[in-house]
């Protein structure tokens, strides 16, 4: 049984709230003994499509809400720091009426990772919804939309980092992963594990002058160190999603391995095991987890460095996992999983080099030596072709490469062949290193973007315009 509260679009209109930017300097962590620490994990409420349609009204405003056991002013969707999960199926239609009630800032919406049109009223990141305006988003998803975990967030350049850091992010689930599981695993408990961090400035979530390495509060579904229960031997589906603005997570479950069934909402062709999973900014993994012997263990993020010029992320406990109750009957996990398309032998129509670089004093970030200009097309690609891109990082820190509309196959990292057993939409580019990807442009034309998903970097110029033409 799925352990979450379901809401249908018939029950009530979905109301979202987004705060105005709060000024401030250094961020302060919450006390370690938060009243909410150790409480049971709460999966986000859900808005679920019915008969091929999910319709919701979204209102943008500033609200004071409970954030990890403390009342703070935050950017909220539907009056919550951790907003509802949007749950759809391939071929569905999503209709969102997005009303901006901010005092001064424009905002908009990006459905991260979804293969959908970038034009008109769909995933058009060039839209500006100004205070007092309502915009009607309309997405028609293809029948072959890949199942898995996606997310949604503000894409209001150049304030995407403060808006997402303030709370503007939530999860999207496309159903269908269970079709690839054996019958005994098709109705297992699943949990959203949305990784979201915040800094505190007085009585508000900090949104201005964000320092990526500053002390921060890492939450799961907006909770500090919640408790996740599982029976010994039980298999659960966890949807790990980094929906923070800037930071990385190196996720590890003490004493257990993750069995990866999807990466960035792309089902894998072979399930693979990992002791830890690096979730660069924007990345997701759908994993199977088996309950260990009775007792408690920790879901952690391990120490991670993004390079000499980057950030040093310390170890932290994300959640406590308690194995308790009668053991379940052992179920063998599958090895093969879903069919995938391999681009290694595809005809390559064009080869390109995309260079990430940066300067300091002042901080500026570039793609191919240029800062973002929404009125300039940087790359033009043809529909129904495959291209190979070398993404080179000339800086001394990692960057989280992301491209909209079409996912890609990661071919190599620093010259070493890579087999990710499927496609992805986000990849970390090593400091002073490079990756090679292949990408098939299918179904949709129009202008979209590629960028670093460390949103501080994107806001300061590390984004380029991609136009897909017939």
Image (tube, helix red, strand yellow):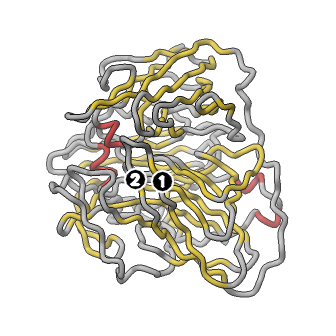
* Mark 1 touches mark 2? (CB < 8 Å): yes
In the current view of this chain or complex, which residue is farthest to the front?
A: 308
The quarter of the rendered structure image containing the N terminus is bottom right
The first of marks 1 and 2 along the sequence is: 1
Is 8 left, or right, of 412 in this rendering? Answer: left
What residue is pinned by disc 1? 304
Q: In terms of secondary structure, where does tag 1 sit? A: strand
Label 2 neighbourhood size at 10 Å, few (<14), some (14-19), many (20+)?
some
Residue plotted at (28% across, 58% down): 75
In the current view of this chain or complex, which residue is farthest to the bottom?
A: 325
Quarter of the rendering containing residue 36: bottom left
What residue is pinned by disc 2? 312
Q: Position of residue 281 (x, y in %)?
A: 45, 47
Q: Position of residue 470 (x, y in %)?
A: 54, 13
Residue plotted at (39% across, 20% down): 368
Q: In terms of secondary structure, where does tag 2 sit? A: strand
Give the answer, above or below, for where 232 lies relative to 121. Answer: below
Is 38 left, or right, of 384 in this rendering? Answer: left
Q: Position of residue 295 (x, y in %)?
A: 64, 84
Label 1, label 2: how far apart the Cα atoms are: 6 Å
Closer to the camera, 443 or 429?
429
Would residue 8 be seen by someone viewing this image from the given angle?
A: no
């Amino acid at each position: 049984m799925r352990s979450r509260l379901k809401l249908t679009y018939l029950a009530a209109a979905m109301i979202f709230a987004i705060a105005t930017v709060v000024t401030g300097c250094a961020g302060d962590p919450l006390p370690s003994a938060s009243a909410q620490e150790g409480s049971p994990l709460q999966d986000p409420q859900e808005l679920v499509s019915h008969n091929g349609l999910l319709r919701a009204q979204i209102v943008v405003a500033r609200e004071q809400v409970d954030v990890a056991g403390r009342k703070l002013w935050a950017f909220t969707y539907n009056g919550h720091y951790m907003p509802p999960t949007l749950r759809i199926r391939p071929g569905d239609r999503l209709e969102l009426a997005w009303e901006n009630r901010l005092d001064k800032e424009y905002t908009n919406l990006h459905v991260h990772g979804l293969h959908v049109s970038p034009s008109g009223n769909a995933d058009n990141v060039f839209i500006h919804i100004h205070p007092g305006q309502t915009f009607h988003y309309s997405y028609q998803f293809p029948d072959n939309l890949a199942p898995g975990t996606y997310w949604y967030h503000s894409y209001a350049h150049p304030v995407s980092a403060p808006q997402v850091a303030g709370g503007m992010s939530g999860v999207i689930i496309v159903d269908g992963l269970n079709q690839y599981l054996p019958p005994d695993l098709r109705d297992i408990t699943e949990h959203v594990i949305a990784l979201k961090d915040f800094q505190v400035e007085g009585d508000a979530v900090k949104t201005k002058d964000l320092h990526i390495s500053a002390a921060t509060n890492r939450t799961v579904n907006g909770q500090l160190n919640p408790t996740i229960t599982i029976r010994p031997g039980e298999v659960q589906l966890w949807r790990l999603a980094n929906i923070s603005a800037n930071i990385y997570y190196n996720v590890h479950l003490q004493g257990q391995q993750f069995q990866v069934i999807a990466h960035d909402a792309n089902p894998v062709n072979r399930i693979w095991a990992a002791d830890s999973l690096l979730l660069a900014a924007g990345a997701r993994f759908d994993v199977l987890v088996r309950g260990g012997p009775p007792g408690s263990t920790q879901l952690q993020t391990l120490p991670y460095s993004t390079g000499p010029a980057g950030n040093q992320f310390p170890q932290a406990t994300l959640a406590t996992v308690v194995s308790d109750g009668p053991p379940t009957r052992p179920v063998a996990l599958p090895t093969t999983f879903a069919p995938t398309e391999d681009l290694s032998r595809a005809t390559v129509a064009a080869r390109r080099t995309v260079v990430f670089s940066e300067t300091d004093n002042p901080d500026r970030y570039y793609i191919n030596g240029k800062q973002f200009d929404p009125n300039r097309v940087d790359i033009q690609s043809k529909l129904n072709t495959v291209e190979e891109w070398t993404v080179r990082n000339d800086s001394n820190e990692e960057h989280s490469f992301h491209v909209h509309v079409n996912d890609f196959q990661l071919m190599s990292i620093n010259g070493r062949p890579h087999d990710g057993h499927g496609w992805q939409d986000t990849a970390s580019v090593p400091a002073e290193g490079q990756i090679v990807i292949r990408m098939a442009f299918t179904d949709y034309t129009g202008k979209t973007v590629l960028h670093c998903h460390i949103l501080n970097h994107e806001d300061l110029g590390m984004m380029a315009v991609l136009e897909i033409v017939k």
